[in-house]
Image: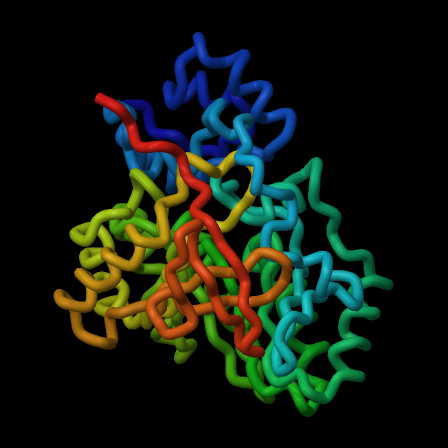
Amino acid sequence: MTIIERRLSSVSDLVAAALVSDSDRDALERVAERYAIALTPAIANAIDRGASSDPLALQFIPSERELQPHPRENDDPIGDRLKSPAPGIVHRYADRVLFKIASVCPVYCRFCFRREMVGPANGEALSAEEFAQAIAYIRQTPSIWEVILTGGDPLILSPRRIRETVEALSTISHVKVLRWHTRVPVVDPERISADLIDALNSSHQTVFVGLHTNHPRELTLAARSAISRLADAGLPLLSQTVLLKGVNDDADTLEALMRQLVELRVKPYYLHHGDLAPGTTHFRTTIEDGRQLMAELRRRVSGIALPTYVLDLPGAHGKVPVESGSLSDTTEGYLFRDRHGRSHHYEDACAAPDVP
């Protein structure tokens, strides 16, 4: 097997690397016209090219199914734009904001809920003026206790840019916690350098790293080393996982992933139900499938290895725990109560089961 040594960012790259067939080129070029494509060498080399349903390939290699949207999908599935009072800011919860400081990623997940907002064609980096406006909003809003750095993937930025961001936020006394959401330690582990780790640290705030990973095979030796470098530097780590049909929608895979994360000093935090992003129907499970998986996971693992299974309600209403009393079954779906006690109807929007 040929070792891939550079980032793959086009259908032609994927064909040349034998990750897709030349016969699929035209169909995948239509996908690429709408959604960004990128695989790092770390991910491309970890894919089993002989397996038609490889869980890594499913996450990162485009499929023409992405151009078959469900009627309830939309380009802002959790309502980022509805809660954006300043450039790059999403203020959905009183005590914390998302600060989207990057518009690109080292890889592009095929199920991404911001897929219409990220990538070279869709994303727009913050200008210096917009960055200043975002910092000013945070400074002028004393209820903000935590800033969650996201994007895109914020750790794709240079250590200099990361350090500048930390320094700007460190001057705001009411901000006590910075949390960096990233795929980089898993998908581009060599980026986790001593310089980058030093840039993440703040002398005025507690810093967390939220690691997005969905399958135990993503935790390669290089990824484990990168995660260890972060943990050894004293940075607490949390994990976020998306429940994906065909990737991790079985108890054995989730158990293996959560156990390995804890062994790597990463606390499992959230298991996300798939958002209603366009062209992601084939990835979503039913709510009931997720509940059953969590019940089985609860029977198998220690509490420190259990994530919270959550649904991000469409329309900017925030996350709700799927297993708790916030959920009621109805004849036409589910009724969820948000943190304010308001009820929201939700129906499964997933592909029909395969018929043998």
| Residue 176 coordinates in the image, percent (x, y) | 59, 87
Nearest the viewer among 253 and 352 is 352
Q: Is residue 127 left or right of residue 25?
A: right
In what quadrant of the picture does the C terminus appear? top left
Q: Is residue 263 left or right of residue 83?
A: left
| Residue 53 coordinates in the image, percent (x, y) | 28, 30
In what quadrant of the picture does the N terminus appear? top left
Furthest residue toward front: 331
Nearest the viewer among 280 and 258 is 280
Nearest the viewer among 304 and 183 is 304
The quarter of the displayed image where residue 43 is located: top left
Q: Is residue 17 left or right of residue 253?
A: right
Q: Is residue 143 left or right of residue 11?
A: right
Q: Residue at x 19, y 68 (%)?
A: 298
Q: Residue at x 66, y 50 (%)?
A: 103
Q: Residue at x 67, y 46 (%)?
A: 117
